[in-house]
């Protein structure tokens, strides 16, 4: 495994995006355990994209404008729903202890769905992984699976770190209702911005 892959993967994972934003918000709203669960859910949400890239389904998605647009706009709609729920302080980002089965299920479903409904991830992995496993390399698929596993592990560790850092500030934040409201509104606006960016993405 090359240093270039590790460095590139770390830069990609550490760059704040939808998953990182969701994990940070969950850490602030629900604490460390819930943020780790959110990090796991977001990581799990990348698995179908990795498998699609390895099996060649990304090429189909890239070639089919209808399939790409359908998944893309489902993702846009879900991000807008997340923005609305966050603004209203309901749903997965509402402030609570995050210890009940129902709340854990909310965190898992939201985290998985956020990444699952982003077709750009499949296209990204389709272009990213082959750079480090040239065509004709012995055991090509196992090597791509190994790189994918490393990428997912890095995703989980980085996102969990973001969430734990946010959770460490939780007590200070929750004692200031005005700050909580502004943070909630900022996250809602961020989800809207992410949905707008996804809406203008092309293959």
Image (cartoon, helix red, strand yellow):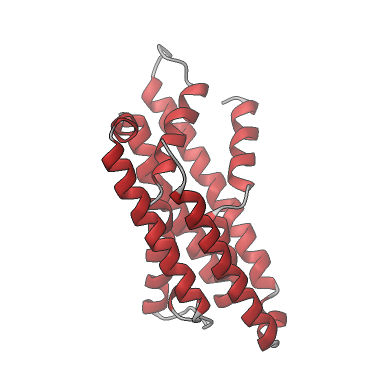
From this view, report whether residue 141 is shown above or below residue 180. Answer: above
From this view, report whether residue 73 is shown above or below residue 141. Answer: below
Report x, y in % for residue 164: 63, 65
Q: How many numbered circles are shown?
A: 0
Report x, y in % for residue 21: 57, 60
Work out which quarter of the rendered image holds the C terminus and state it. Answer: top left
Q: Nearer the viewer, residue 128 or 197?
A: 197
Work out which quarter of the rendered image holds the N terminus and state it. Answer: top right
Report x, y in % for residue 118: 41, 49
Q: Quadrant of residue 144?
A: top left
Q: Nearer the viewer, residue 84 or 131?
A: 84
Residue 31 as seen in the image, left or right of residue 54: right
Q: Nearer the viewer, residue 51 or 157?
A: 51
From this view, report whether residue 149 is shown above or below residue 17. Answer: above
Q: Residue furthest top?
A: 136
User: At 55% across and 76% down in the image, what residue appears?
Assistant: 30
From this view, report whether residue 142 is shown above or below residue 51. Answer: above
User: At 49% across and 63% down in the image, what residue appears?
Assistant: 38
Residue 168 as seen in the image, left or right of residue 73: right
User: At 49% across and 55% down in the image, what residue appears?
Assistant: 196
User: At 38% across and 44% down in the image, what residue appears?
Assistant: 119
Report x, y in % for residue 128: 49, 30
Q: Residue furthest front?
A: 200
């Amino acid at each position: 495994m090359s240093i270039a892959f590790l460095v590139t993967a770390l830069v990609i994972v550490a760059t704040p995006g939808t998953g990182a934003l969701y994990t940070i918000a969950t850490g602030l709203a629900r604490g460390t355990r819930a943020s780790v669960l959110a990090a796991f859910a977001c990581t799990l949400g990348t698995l179908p994209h990795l498998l699609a890239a390895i099996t060649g389904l990304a090429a189909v998605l890239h070639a089919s404008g209808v399939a790409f647009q359908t998944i893309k706009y489902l993702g846009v709609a879900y991000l807008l729903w997340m923005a609305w729920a966050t603004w209203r302080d309901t749903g997965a980002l509402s402030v609570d202890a995050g210890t009940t089965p129902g709340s854990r299920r909310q965190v898992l479903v939201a985290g998985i769905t956020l990444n699952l409904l982003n077709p750009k991830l499949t296209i990204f992995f389709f272009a990213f992984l082959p750079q480090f496993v040239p065509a004709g390399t012995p055991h090509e698929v196992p090597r791509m699976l190994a790189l994918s596993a490393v990428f997912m592990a890095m995703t989980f560790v980085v996102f969990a770190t973001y969430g734990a850092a946010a959770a460490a500030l939780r007590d200070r934040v929750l004692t200031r209702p005005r700050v909580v409201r502004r943070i909630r509104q900022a996250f809602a606006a961020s989800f809207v911005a992410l949905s707008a960016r996804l809406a203008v993405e092309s293959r």
